[in-house]
Amino acid sequence: MNISPGPSNVYVMARAIAQGTKGGIVAAMGLAVGSMVHVVATVLGLSAIFSHFPTLYTAVKLLGAAYLVYWGDKSLEKRIFWRR
């Protein structure tokens, strides 16, 4: 089920309003790449593999969390730097 405008559309609109056309296009491209990653994972049957190897699933989740923490830290670092 797809409800439009969903959170993805709202995100693209917010970036376009705040940063102009370039920000909106970058946001849309990022969402498209993320969707393609999910499609490729589905095609490869990763959910079946993860159901048989729960430790592998946990490792992937932890790597994803570490990735988000890393970029969150970099984002905060950049904001603090610009305030000085």
Image (cartoon, grey):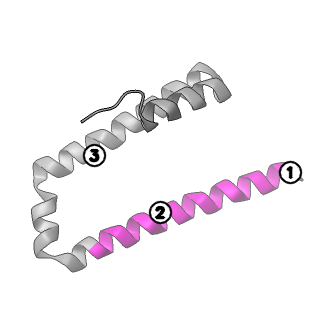
User: Separation of disc 2 and disc 1 at Cα?
Assistant: 25 Å
The spot of residue 65 in percent (x, y) is 45, 67
> Would you name the residue on which mark 1 appears?
83
Q: Earlier in the sequence, mark 3 or mark 1?
A: 3
- Is residue 81 magenta-colored? yes
The spot of residue 3 in percent (x, y) is 34, 31
Q: Is residue 74 above or below residue 65?
A: above
| Residue located 80% across and 54% down the image | 81
> Would you name the residue on which mark 3 appears?
37
Q: Which residues are magenta?
A: 58-84
The three-letter code of the residue at mark 1 reads Arg
Main secondary structure found in the magenta portion: helix
Q: Is residue 79 above or below residue 8?
A: below
Q: Is residue 77 above or below residue 3?
A: below
Q: Give the image quarter of residue 19.
A: top right
Horizontal placement of 6 versus 44: left or right?
Answer: right
| Disc 2: CA contacts within 10 A as few (<14), some (14-19) or many (>=20) | few
Horizontal placement of 66 versus 71: left or right?
Answer: left
Q: Is residue 45 above or below residue 52?
A: above
Q: Earlier in the sequence, mark 2 or mark 3?
A: 3
Q: Give the image quarter of residue 16.
A: top right
The three-letter code of the residue at mark 3 reads Val
The spot of residue 53 in percent (x, y) is 15, 76
User: Separation of disc 3 and disc 1 at Cα?
Assistant: 36 Å
